[in-house]
Image (tube, rainbow, N blue to C red):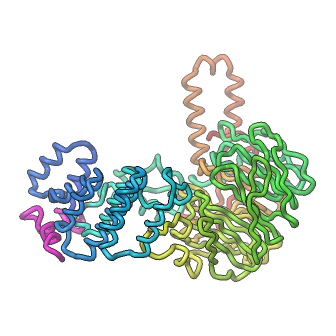
């Protein structure tokens, strides 16, 4: 411990480290008061914080720490560096901190197109430090960028403007003793961690924002998960092979062996109605993919991909680049370009506006399925050789996860890129925790390349149908609040739902009379789930919580319009008869286990009845 750390231990005078608070005496009183003072400042009650400091004799942080924070956020680089010696006596930490500060100074000079100041900073201030030489060379290469800055290169910059100084401060914070400079919003972070811990312990947690309270512990039951069939979509005349909600959750697309795709609109009270029927396919529609802005939809049929306008249902482009059936496709973030994969070992980058091939990658393996990260940085591909490959598009570096234990059928990437779900043909799913591997990586980031830290084994394993071999391509997915649930269909007509982290099977949904080929959880309504089956139908599942909210809203509307209710008594009676009866769940009232089976048909008074959203 250095002298400054000891100084902070003594802040508060008569209050010692042994002075503890709380039922279990785990809370250091001095630290707690300091966090209260910081929270009061953040809430705008600086005068109350000062009064608390006077009354307790506990100082939030020394003046030179506040001066350091002010200097960094104000871009006063010399002042910030002059204060480092007051924050720590460790020379290696001071050098690293100076390097980070000067790096920000250098990058901001480049952004201002002040190449002279940038070069001076690089040669006369950063180079003499003698640290991070490789990174120094990378920084020097940025001088070759044009004045406005090469867009691709600038995406790797650590900083570049006042908006990034907060990030710099967090990097410096990580190098300094935590009791010296309190992390920003520390009390709020601790409270949120406590709430998150309560939610993580509840297997049925789903969209709990309205239930969270600081005055009571959090609890949620099975009523928060989609277990009731509220509508059966029977527009298709043959097996339904794929189903996918739009990113904004207001539309649903279904693809079928009948060579059509149907666009559905999610109406009020969670009722779905047909928007467009997409025809003209010469083979079954095996795959659907929404553009990030939900304005375009790709349908994959045989060797052909078709791009459709969602608003009008008109065909925009037909793409026939592959020589074998298209197995997968994924949009880039710009909603203009997409990539497609096939058993012909080729991956194409295509411009959807004109159908032109922009780039082609010829690989050594057949592509079984693919996904791309939300920022378009990493392409994830499953091969027919039991491997999953991660290709970082910025530098075309490719790595792979350990070989799977069985052939891969499909994969699903969590929207935040932290988890990957891999479905195997032995009725088994593997969850891979990718961590930061799919996050943007800069040559200026200190530490190892995230692609070098991939996991060696799955974080969780989910099994169903007694591990029997799978004959068809069954698509899996994530869903629910925070994507904490895993969902998969089975050849036995079941829909299986697990808790992502614990691996516990929460329940099985029955109702389909054929193989469930695909499932899709509404990304904006965690109470809604869709499943597609060989029985030619798509089932819409809803949570009792949503149904109860809809019934409450309907009752409120009826109460608010007594004259209408009096004049149109018959209409209101009919509306009341349309509401869904309470679900009759074949499970005990306590926590559900792996044998919990939800009968979709038994839980609805009328499968097509509309319900409240």
Return the x and y of residue 423 as percentages of the image width and height: 70, 71
Q: Nearer the viewer, residue 28 or 158?
A: 158
> Does 211 appear above or below 364?
above
Residue placed farthest to the left in the image? 14
Return the x and y of residue 271 as percentages of the image width and height: 71, 40
Q: Nearer the viewer, residue 599 or 53?
A: 53
Residue placed farthest to the right in the image? 282
Return the x and y of residue 175 as percentages of the image width and height: 30, 70
14 left or right, relative to 308: left
State yes or no: residue 106 in magenta.
Answer: no
285 left or right, relative to 98: right
Q: Nearer the viewer, residue 539 or 65?
A: 65
Q: Nearer the viewer, residue 53 or 139?
A: 139
Residue 474 visible in the current orientation: no
Q: Quadrant of the N terminus?
A: bottom left
User: What residue do we see at 70% from left, 53% from top?
Assistant: 337
Q: How many dots with numbers?
A: 0
Quadrant assignment, res 424 = bottom right
Q: Quadrant of the C terminus?
A: top right
Residue 395 visible in the current orientation: yes
User: What residue do we see at 6% from left, 64% from top?
Assistant: 14
User: What residue do we see at 56% from left, 58% from top?
Assistant: 152
User: What residue do we see at 72% from left, 49% from top?
Assistant: 540
State yes or no: residue 21 in magenta.
Answer: yes
169 left or right, relative to 138: left
Return the x and y of residue 612 as percentages of the image width and height: 63, 39
Q: Magenta part of the protein: which range?
A: 1-30
> Does 291 appear above or below 85?
above
């Amino acid at each position: 411990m250095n002298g400054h750390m000891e100084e902070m231990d003594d802040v508060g005078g008569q209050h010692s480290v042994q002075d503890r608070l709380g039922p279990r005496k785990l809370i250091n009183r001095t630290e707690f008061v300091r966090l209260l003072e910081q929270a009061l400042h953040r809430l705008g009650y600086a005068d109350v914080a000062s009064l608390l400091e006077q009354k307790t004799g506990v100082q939030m942080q020394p003046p030179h720490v506040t001066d350091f924070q002010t200097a960094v956020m104000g871009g006063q680089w010399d002042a910030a560096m002059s204060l480092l010696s007051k924050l720590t006596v460790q020379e290696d930490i001071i050098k690293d901190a100076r390097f980070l500060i000067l790096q920000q100074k250098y990058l901001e000079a480049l952004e201002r197109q002040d190449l002279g100041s940038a070069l001076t900073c690089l040669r006369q201030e950063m180079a003499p430090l003698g640290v991070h030489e490789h990174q120094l060379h990378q920084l020097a290469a940025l001088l070759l960028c044009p004045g406005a800055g090469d867009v691709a290169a600038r995406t790797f910059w650590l900083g570049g403007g006042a908006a990034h100084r907060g990030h710099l401060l967090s990097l410096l914070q990580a190098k300094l003793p935590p009791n010296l400079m309190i992390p920003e919003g520390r009390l709020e972070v601790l409270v949120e961690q406590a709430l998150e811990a309560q939610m993580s312990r509840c297997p049925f947690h789903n969209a709990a924002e309205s239930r969270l309270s600081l005055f009571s512990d959090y609890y949620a039951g099975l009523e928060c998960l989609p277990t009731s069939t509220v509508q059966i979509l029977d527009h298709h005349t043959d097996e339904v092979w794929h189903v996918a909600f739009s990113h904004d959750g207001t539309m649903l697309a279904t693809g079928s062996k009948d060579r059509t795709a149907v666009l559905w609109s999610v109406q009020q009270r969670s009722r779905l109605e047909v928007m467009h029927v997409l025809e003209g396919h010469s083979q079954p529609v095996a795959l659907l993919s929404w553009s990030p802005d939900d304005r375009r939809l790709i349908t994959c049929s045989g060797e052909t991909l078709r791009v459709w306008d969602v608003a009008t249902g008109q065909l925009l482009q037909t793409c026939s680049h592959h020589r074998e059936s298209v197995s997968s496709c994924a949009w880039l973030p710009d909603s203009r370009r997409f990539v497609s994969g096939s058993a012909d070992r080729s991956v194409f980058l295509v411009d959807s506006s004109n159908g032109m091939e922009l780039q082609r990658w010829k690989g050594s393996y057949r592509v079984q399925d693919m996904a791309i990260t939300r920022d378009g940085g990493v392409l994830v591909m499953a091969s027919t050789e039991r491997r999953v490959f991660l290709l970082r598009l910025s530098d075309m570096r490719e790595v792979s996860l350990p070989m799977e234990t069985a052939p891969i059928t499909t994969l699903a990437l969590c929207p935040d890129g932290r988890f990957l779900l891999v479905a195997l043909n032995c009725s088994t799913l593997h969850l891979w925790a990718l961590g930061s591997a799919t996050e943007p990586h800069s040559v200026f980031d200190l530490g190892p390349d995230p692609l070098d830290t991939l996991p060696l084994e799955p974080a969780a394993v989910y099994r169903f149908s007694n591990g029997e071999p799978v004959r068809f391509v069954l698509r899996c997915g994530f869903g629910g609040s925070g994507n904490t649930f895993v969902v998969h269909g089975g050849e036995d007509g079941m829909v299986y739902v697990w808790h992502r982290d614990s691996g516990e099977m929460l329940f099985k949904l029955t109702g389909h009379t054929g193989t469930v080929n695909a499932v899709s959880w509404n990304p904006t309504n965690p109470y809604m789930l869709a499943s597609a089956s060989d029985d030619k139908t798509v089932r819409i599942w809803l949570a009792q919580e949503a149904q109860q909210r809809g019934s409450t809203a309907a009752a409120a509307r009826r109460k608010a319009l007594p004259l209408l209710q009096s004049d149109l008594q018959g209409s209101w009676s009919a509306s009341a008869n349309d509401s869904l009866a309470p679900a009759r769940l074949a499970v005990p009232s306590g926590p559900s286990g792996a044998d919990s089976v939800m009968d979709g048909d038994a839980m609805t008074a009328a499968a097509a009845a509309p319900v409240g959203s």
